[in-house]
Image: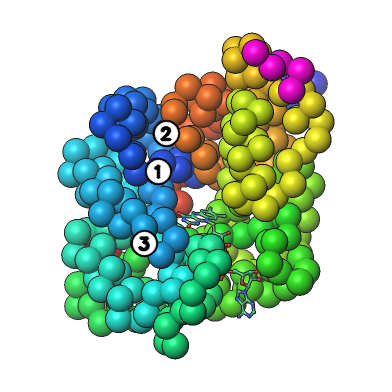
Protein backbone atom coordinates (compact mmCIF):
# COMPACT_ATOMS: atom_id res chain seq x y z
CA UNK A 1 0.00 0.00 0.00
CA UNK A 2 2.75 2.40 0.98
CA UNK A 3 4.33 2.31 -2.44
CA UNK A 4 1.07 2.42 -4.36
CA UNK A 5 0.66 5.52 -6.50
CA UNK A 6 -2.14 7.64 -5.10
CA UNK A 7 -4.28 9.14 -7.84
CA UNK A 8 -6.72 11.81 -6.71
CA UNK A 9 -10.24 11.03 -7.94
CA UNK A 10 -11.17 13.21 -10.91
CA UNK A 11 -13.77 15.86 -10.11
CA UNK A 12 -17.21 15.30 -11.59
CA UNK A 13 -17.91 17.20 -14.77
CA UNK A 14 -20.99 18.80 -16.36
CA UNK A 15 -22.26 16.83 -19.34
CA UNK A 16 -24.59 18.24 -21.98
CA UNK A 17 -25.75 17.64 -25.56
CA UNK A 18 -26.88 19.79 -28.46
CA UNK A 19 -29.97 18.87 -30.49
CA UNK A 20 -31.67 20.67 -33.36
CA UNK A 21 -35.40 20.83 -34.15
CA UNK A 22 -36.37 18.10 -36.66
CA UNK A 23 -37.45 19.09 -40.17
CA UNK A 24 -39.65 16.06 -41.00
CA UNK A 25 -41.65 13.27 -39.39
CA UNK A 26 -38.87 10.76 -40.08
CA UNK A 27 -36.27 13.12 -38.57
CA UNK A 28 -38.50 13.55 -35.53
CA UNK A 29 -38.66 9.76 -34.97
CA UNK A 30 -34.83 9.49 -35.14
CA UNK A 31 -34.51 12.45 -32.78
CA UNK A 32 -36.83 10.92 -30.19
CA UNK A 33 -34.86 7.66 -30.21
CA UNK A 34 -31.76 9.78 -29.62
CA UNK A 35 -33.45 11.74 -26.84
CA UNK A 36 -34.38 8.56 -24.96
CA UNK A 37 -30.83 7.18 -25.31
CA UNK A 38 -29.30 10.43 -24.08
CA UNK A 39 -31.80 10.72 -21.22
CA UNK A 40 -30.39 7.50 -19.80
CA UNK A 41 -27.00 9.21 -19.27
CA UNK A 42 -28.60 11.81 -16.97
CA UNK A 43 -26.97 14.92 -18.46
CA UNK A 44 -27.02 18.33 -16.86
CA UNK A 45 -29.08 19.70 -19.78
CA UNK A 46 -29.73 19.35 -23.51
CA UNK A 47 -29.54 22.42 -25.70
CA UNK A 48 -31.89 23.11 -28.63
CA UNK A 49 -30.66 25.23 -31.54
CA UNK A 50 -32.57 28.22 -32.92
CA UNK A 51 -32.31 29.59 -36.47
CA UNK A 52 -30.74 33.00 -36.98
CA UNK A 53 -33.60 35.52 -37.27
CA UNK A 54 -35.93 32.97 -35.66
CA UNK A 55 -36.39 31.00 -38.89
CA UNK A 56 -37.39 27.84 -36.98
CA UNK A 57 -39.00 29.57 -34.00
CA UNK A 58 -42.06 27.26 -33.81
CA UNK A 59 -40.28 23.91 -34.20
CA UNK A 60 -37.58 24.98 -31.72
CA UNK A 61 -40.14 25.98 -29.10
CA UNK A 62 -42.14 22.79 -29.70
CA UNK A 63 -39.05 20.68 -29.05
CA UNK A 64 -38.13 22.67 -25.93
CA UNK A 65 -41.67 22.28 -24.62
CA UNK A 66 -41.82 18.53 -25.32
CA UNK A 67 -38.48 18.05 -23.55
CA UNK A 68 -39.95 19.84 -20.52
CA UNK A 69 -43.21 17.91 -20.51
CA UNK A 70 -42.26 14.44 -21.72
CA UNK A 71 -38.73 13.80 -20.44
CA UNK A 72 -36.61 14.22 -17.35
CA UNK A 73 -34.22 16.40 -19.36
CA UNK A 74 -33.61 20.07 -18.66
CA UNK A 75 -33.65 22.13 -21.89
CA UNK A 76 -31.25 24.98 -22.60
CA UNK A 77 -33.00 27.00 -25.33
CA UNK A 78 -30.67 28.69 -27.84
CA UNK A 79 -31.89 32.15 -28.80
CA UNK A 80 -30.42 34.37 -31.53
CA UNK A 81 -30.85 38.13 -31.53
CA UNK A 82 -29.50 39.32 -34.86
CA UNK A 83 -32.01 41.61 -36.59
CA UNK A 84 -34.53 41.29 -33.74
CA UNK A 85 -35.86 44.39 -32.00
CA UNK A 86 -35.94 44.62 -28.18
CA UNK A 87 -39.73 44.24 -28.10
CA UNK A 88 -39.71 41.15 -30.38
CA UNK A 89 -36.97 39.49 -28.38
CA UNK A 90 -38.53 40.36 -25.04
CA UNK A 91 -41.72 38.63 -26.22
CA UNK A 92 -39.76 35.46 -27.08
CA UNK A 93 -37.90 35.52 -23.75
CA UNK A 94 -41.15 36.04 -21.83
CA UNK A 95 -42.71 33.15 -23.74
CA UNK A 96 -39.76 30.87 -22.84
CA UNK A 97 -39.95 31.87 -19.17
CA UNK A 98 -43.74 31.36 -19.15
CA UNK A 99 -43.20 27.85 -20.49
CA UNK A 100 -40.92 27.15 -17.54
CA UNK A 101 -37.60 27.35 -19.40
CA UNK A 102 -34.83 28.35 -17.01
CA UNK A 103 -31.77 28.07 -19.27
CA UNK A 104 -31.06 30.18 -22.37
CA UNK A 105 -27.98 30.20 -24.63
CA UNK A 106 -27.79 33.84 -25.76
CA UNK A 107 -26.35 34.15 -29.27
CA UNK A 108 -26.12 36.71 -32.00
CA UNK A 109 -26.64 34.29 -34.91
CA UNK A 110 -25.20 34.95 -38.34
CA UNK A 111 -26.23 38.29 -39.79
CA UNK A 112 -28.35 38.18 -42.97
CA UNK A 113 -26.21 38.98 -46.04
CA UNK A 114 -28.79 41.29 -47.60
CA UNK A 115 -31.23 43.86 -46.31
CA UNK A 116 -30.89 46.56 -43.67
CA UNK A 117 -31.54 45.72 -40.01
CA UNK A 118 -34.18 47.67 -38.08
CA UNK A 119 -32.70 50.75 -36.43
CA UNK A 120 -33.12 49.44 -32.89
CA UNK A 121 -32.19 45.79 -33.71
CA UNK A 122 -29.86 44.06 -31.27
CA UNK A 123 -26.37 43.68 -32.70
CA UNK A 124 -24.38 41.60 -30.25
CA UNK A 125 -24.99 38.60 -28.00
CA UNK A 126 -24.10 40.67 -24.93
CA UNK A 127 -27.17 42.86 -25.65
CA UNK A 128 -29.36 39.75 -25.57
CA UNK A 129 -27.81 38.65 -22.26
CA UNK A 130 -28.72 42.06 -20.80
CA UNK A 131 -32.25 41.83 -22.27
CA UNK A 132 -32.80 38.39 -20.67
CA UNK A 133 -31.52 39.65 -17.30
CA UNK A 134 -33.92 42.60 -17.57
CA UNK A 135 -36.86 40.25 -18.32
CA UNK A 136 -35.84 38.15 -15.33
CA UNK A 137 -35.61 41.29 -13.15
CA UNK A 138 -39.20 42.21 -13.99
CA UNK A 139 -40.24 38.87 -12.48
CA UNK A 140 -38.31 39.29 -9.26
CA UNK A 141 -41.18 37.89 -7.19
CA UNK A 142 -41.30 34.68 -9.25
CA UNK A 143 -37.51 34.31 -9.32
CA UNK A 144 -36.83 35.33 -5.74
CA UNK A 145 -35.27 31.95 -5.00
CA UNK A 146 -32.93 31.77 -7.95
CA UNK A 147 -32.34 32.89 -11.48
CA UNK A 148 -32.27 32.00 -15.11
CA UNK A 149 -29.04 30.36 -16.26
CA UNK A 150 -27.58 32.17 -19.29
CA UNK A 151 -24.92 30.63 -21.51
CA UNK A 152 -22.96 32.31 -24.31
CA UNK A 153 -20.63 31.26 -27.14
CA UNK A 154 -16.82 31.33 -26.88
CA UNK A 155 -14.23 30.82 -29.60
CA UNK A 156 -11.03 28.75 -29.24
CA UNK A 157 -10.22 29.62 -32.88
CA UNK A 158 -10.82 33.29 -33.70
CA UNK A 159 -14.41 34.20 -34.64
CA UNK A 160 -14.36 34.77 -38.42
CA UNK A 161 -15.53 38.41 -38.14
CA UNK A 162 -13.31 39.29 -35.19
CA UNK A 163 -10.10 41.33 -35.64
CA UNK A 164 -8.14 39.20 -33.17
CA UNK A 165 -8.28 36.48 -30.51
CA UNK A 166 -7.70 39.21 -27.92
CA UNK A 167 -10.89 40.92 -29.11
CA UNK A 168 -12.80 37.62 -28.74
CA UNK A 169 -11.75 37.51 -25.08
CA UNK A 170 -12.88 41.13 -24.57
CA UNK A 171 -16.27 40.17 -26.03
CA UNK A 172 -16.49 37.15 -23.72
CA UNK A 173 -15.74 39.42 -20.76
CA UNK A 174 -18.48 41.81 -21.94
CA UNK A 175 -20.94 38.89 -22.04
CA UNK A 176 -19.94 37.91 -18.50
CA UNK A 177 -20.40 41.50 -17.30
CA UNK A 178 -23.84 41.60 -18.95
CA UNK A 179 -24.79 38.58 -16.81
CA UNK A 180 -23.69 35.34 -18.53
CA UNK A 181 -23.18 32.35 -16.23
CA UNK A 182 -21.15 30.05 -18.47
CA UNK A 183 -19.79 29.69 -21.99
CA UNK A 184 -19.80 26.83 -24.50
CA UNK A 185 -17.11 26.81 -27.15
CA UNK A 186 -17.38 26.65 -30.89
CA UNK A 187 -15.87 23.52 -32.44
CA UNK A 188 -12.07 23.29 -32.32
CA UNK A 189 -9.57 20.67 -33.47
CA UNK A 190 -6.60 21.12 -31.11
CA UNK A 191 -6.84 21.02 -27.31
CA UNK A 192 -4.16 23.71 -27.12
CA UNK A 193 -6.66 26.16 -28.70
CA UNK A 194 -9.10 25.44 -25.85
CA UNK A 195 -6.51 25.73 -23.06
CA UNK A 196 -5.08 28.90 -24.61
CA UNK A 197 -8.56 30.47 -24.71
CA UNK A 198 -9.15 29.57 -21.04
CA UNK A 199 -5.72 30.96 -20.04
CA UNK A 200 -6.25 34.22 -21.92
CA UNK A 201 -9.82 34.57 -20.66
CA UNK A 202 -8.79 34.03 -17.01
CA UNK A 203 -6.01 36.62 -17.37
CA UNK A 204 -8.57 39.11 -18.71
CA UNK A 205 -10.92 38.57 -15.76
CA UNK A 206 -13.33 35.98 -17.16
CA UNK A 207 -14.31 33.70 -14.29
CA UNK A 208 -17.32 31.79 -15.69
CA UNK A 209 -16.94 28.09 -16.67
CA UNK A 210 -15.90 27.61 -20.31
CA UNK A 211 -17.23 24.27 -21.53
CA UNK A 212 -15.54 22.71 -24.58
CA UNK A 213 -17.93 21.87 -27.44
CA UNK A 214 -16.97 18.50 -28.91
CA UNK A 215 -18.33 17.42 -32.29
CA UNK A 216 -17.83 13.84 -33.47
CA UNK A 217 -17.01 14.41 -37.15
CA UNK A 218 -17.76 11.00 -38.57
CA UNK A 219 -17.83 11.77 -42.31
CA UNK A 220 -15.97 13.89 -44.82
CA UNK A 221 -19.21 15.61 -45.86
CA UNK A 222 -19.90 16.61 -42.26
CA UNK A 223 -16.45 18.12 -41.65
CA UNK A 224 -16.56 20.04 -44.95
CA UNK A 225 -20.03 21.40 -44.21
CA UNK A 226 -18.97 22.38 -40.70
CA UNK A 227 -16.05 24.46 -41.99
CA UNK A 228 -18.35 26.38 -44.32
CA UNK A 229 -20.99 27.00 -41.65
CA UNK A 230 -18.72 27.85 -38.72
CA UNK A 231 -15.76 29.41 -40.50
CA UNK A 232 -13.46 27.14 -38.47
CA UNK A 233 -10.70 25.66 -40.66
CA UNK A 234 -10.87 21.86 -40.51
CA UNK A 235 -7.84 19.93 -39.29
CA UNK A 236 -6.10 18.79 -42.53
CA UNK A 237 -4.85 15.57 -40.87
CA UNK A 238 -8.41 14.57 -39.88
CA UNK A 239 -9.70 15.51 -43.33
CA UNK A 240 -7.00 13.27 -44.91
CA UNK A 241 -7.91 10.35 -42.66
CA UNK A 242 -11.61 10.71 -43.46
CA UNK A 243 -10.79 11.02 -47.16
CA UNK A 244 -8.77 7.79 -46.90
CA UNK A 245 -11.91 6.08 -45.54
CA UNK A 246 -14.02 7.20 -48.52
CA UNK A 247 -16.76 4.67 -49.21
CA UNK A 248 -16.36 2.95 -45.82
CA UNK A 249 -18.87 4.61 -43.45
CA UNK A 250 -17.86 2.39 -40.49
CA UNK A 251 -14.20 3.30 -40.83
CA UNK A 252 -15.07 7.02 -41.08
CA UNK A 253 -17.28 6.67 -37.98
CA UNK A 254 -14.40 5.08 -36.03
CA UNK A 255 -12.00 7.84 -37.13
CA UNK A 256 -14.44 10.58 -36.06
CA UNK A 257 -15.13 8.99 -32.67
CA UNK A 258 -11.41 8.40 -32.04
CA UNK A 259 -10.56 12.05 -32.81
CA UNK A 260 -13.32 13.29 -30.46
CA UNK A 261 -12.16 10.99 -27.65
CA UNK A 262 -8.60 12.34 -27.91
CA UNK A 263 -9.79 15.93 -28.03
CA UNK A 264 -12.17 15.51 -25.08
CA UNK A 265 -9.50 13.72 -23.02
CA UNK A 266 -7.01 16.49 -23.68
CA UNK A 267 -9.56 19.20 -22.83
CA UNK A 268 -10.45 17.42 -19.56
CA UNK A 269 -6.75 17.04 -18.75
CA UNK A 270 -6.45 20.80 -19.28
CA UNK A 271 -9.11 21.30 -16.58
CA UNK A 272 -12.35 21.54 -18.60
CA UNK A 273 -15.29 21.62 -16.15
CA UNK A 274 -17.61 19.77 -18.53
CA UNK A 275 -18.23 18.49 -22.04
CA UNK A 276 -20.89 19.67 -24.48
CA UNK A 277 -21.43 17.14 -27.27
CA UNK A 278 -22.80 18.28 -30.62
CA UNK A 279 -24.90 15.23 -31.50
CA UNK A 280 -26.38 15.96 -34.98
CA UNK A 281 -29.49 14.37 -33.42
CA UNK A 282 -27.75 10.96 -33.39
CA UNK A 283 -26.79 9.24 -30.17
CA UNK A 284 -24.36 6.55 -31.37
CA UNK A 285 -21.18 8.59 -31.82
CA UNK A 286 -21.72 10.73 -28.71
CA UNK A 287 -22.39 7.71 -26.50
CA UNK A 288 -19.34 5.91 -27.92
CA UNK A 289 -17.18 8.93 -27.10
CA UNK A 290 -18.56 9.01 -23.56
CA UNK A 291 -18.12 5.25 -23.15
CA UNK A 292 -14.46 5.53 -24.12
CA UNK A 293 -13.81 8.44 -21.74
CA UNK A 294 -14.64 6.65 -18.51
CA UNK A 295 -16.04 9.81 -16.94
CA UNK A 296 -16.32 10.26 -13.19
CA UNK A 297 -19.85 9.94 -11.80
CA UNK A 298 -22.09 11.55 -10.75
CA UNK A 299 -22.09 14.19 -13.43
CA UNK A 300 -21.74 17.61 -11.85
CA UNK A 301 -24.94 19.63 -12.16
CA UNK A 302 -23.54 22.94 -13.32
CA UNK A 303 -26.94 24.32 -14.27
CA UNK A 304 -29.28 21.93 -12.54
CA UNK A 305 -28.86 23.51 -9.13
CA UNK A 306 -29.72 26.93 -10.50
CA UNK A 307 -32.71 25.65 -12.46
CA UNK A 308 -34.12 23.82 -9.47
CA UNK A 309 -33.78 26.94 -7.38
CA UNK A 310 -35.58 29.04 -9.98
CA UNK A 311 -38.50 26.76 -10.88
P1 LIG B 1 -21.31 37.92 -30.61
O1 LIG B 1 -20.77 37.62 -29.27
O2 LIG B 1 -22.24 39.07 -30.73
O3 LIG B 1 -20.07 38.14 -31.59
C1 LIG B 1 -20.26 38.27 -32.99
C2 LIG B 1 -19.16 39.13 -33.59
O4 LIG B 1 -19.32 40.47 -33.14
C3 LIG B 1 -17.77 38.69 -33.19
O5 LIG B 1 -16.88 38.85 -34.26
C4 LIG B 1 -17.42 39.64 -32.07
O6 LIG B 1 -16.03 39.83 -31.99
C5 LIG B 1 -18.15 40.91 -32.48
N1 LIG B 1 -18.57 41.71 -31.31
C6 LIG B 1 -19.32 41.30 -30.27
N2 LIG B 1 -19.51 42.31 -29.40
C7 LIG B 1 -18.87 43.38 -29.91
C8 LIG B 1 -18.72 44.71 -29.49
N3 LIG B 1 -19.26 45.17 -28.36
N4 LIG B 1 -17.98 45.57 -30.27
C9 LIG B 1 -17.43 45.14 -31.41
N5 LIG B 1 -17.54 43.87 -31.87
C10 LIG B 1 -18.26 43.01 -31.14
N6 LIG B 1 -26.12 30.14 -34.49
C11 LIG B 1 -27.45 30.07 -34.75
O7 LIG B 1 -27.95 30.73 -35.67
N7 LIG B 1 -28.28 29.26 -33.99
C12 LIG B 1 -27.81 28.52 -32.95
O8 LIG B 1 -28.60 27.82 -32.28
C13 LIG B 1 -26.41 28.58 -32.66
N8 LIG B 1 -25.89 27.89 -31.62
C14 LIG B 1 -24.56 28.03 -31.31
C15 LIG B 1 -24.05 27.35 -30.18
C16 LIG B 1 -22.71 27.49 -29.83
C17 LIG B 1 -22.18 26.77 -28.61
C18 LIG B 1 -21.84 28.31 -30.63
C19 LIG B 1 -20.39 28.46 -30.26
C20 LIG B 1 -22.33 28.97 -31.75
C21 LIG B 1 -23.69 28.84 -32.10
N9 LIG B 1 -24.23 29.53 -33.19
C22 LIG B 1 -25.59 29.44 -33.47
C23 LIG B 1 -23.36 30.32 -34.08
C24 LIG B 1 -23.27 31.81 -33.67
O9 LIG B 1 -24.54 32.41 -33.86
C25 LIG B 1 -22.22 32.47 -34.57
O10 LIG B 1 -20.95 32.00 -34.23
C26 LIG B 1 -22.28 33.98 -34.67
O11 LIG B 1 -21.48 34.37 -35.79
C27 LIG B 1 -21.73 34.72 -33.45
O12 LIG B 1 -22.53 34.54 -32.37
P2 LIG B 1 -22.11 35.12 -30.91
O13 LIG B 1 -23.23 34.84 -30.03
O14 LIG B 1 -20.75 34.66 -30.54
O15 LIG B 1 -22.04 36.68 -31.27
Q: Residue furthest bottom?
A: 119
Residue at image coords 51%, 66%: 112
Pointer 1 residue: 20
| Placement of 36 over or under 89, stated as above or below | above
Of residues 219 and 277, the one drawn nearer to the viewer in this rendering: 219
Q: Is mark 3 on a helix, strand or loop?
A: helix
Q: Nearer the viewer, mark 3 or mark 2?
A: 3
Pointer 3 residue: 54
| Placement of 242 over or under 115, stated as above or below | above
Q: Distance between the residues labelled 1 and 2?
A: 7 Å
Q: Earlier in the sequence, mark 1 or mark 3?
A: 1
282 to the left or right of 202? left
Q: Distance between the residues labelled 3 and 2?
A: 20 Å
| Placement of 247 over or under 44, stated as above or below | above
Q: Residue 195: in sight, yes or no?
A: no
Q: Do the residues labelled 1 and 2 touch (CB within 8 Å)?
A: yes
Is residue 236 found inside the magenta-colored segment of the image? no
Pointer 2 residue: 281
Residue at image coords 43%, 70%: 81
Which picture quadrant has residue 242? top right
Amino acid sequence: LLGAPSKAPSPPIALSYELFPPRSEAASRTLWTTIRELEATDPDYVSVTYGASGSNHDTALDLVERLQLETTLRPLAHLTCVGGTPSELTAVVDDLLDRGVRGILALRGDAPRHGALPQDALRHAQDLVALIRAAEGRRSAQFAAGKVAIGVAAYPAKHPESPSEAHDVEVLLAKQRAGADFAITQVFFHAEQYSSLVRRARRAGVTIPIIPGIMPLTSLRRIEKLSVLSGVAADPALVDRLRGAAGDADAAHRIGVEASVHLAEAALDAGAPGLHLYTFNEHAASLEVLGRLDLPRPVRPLLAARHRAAV
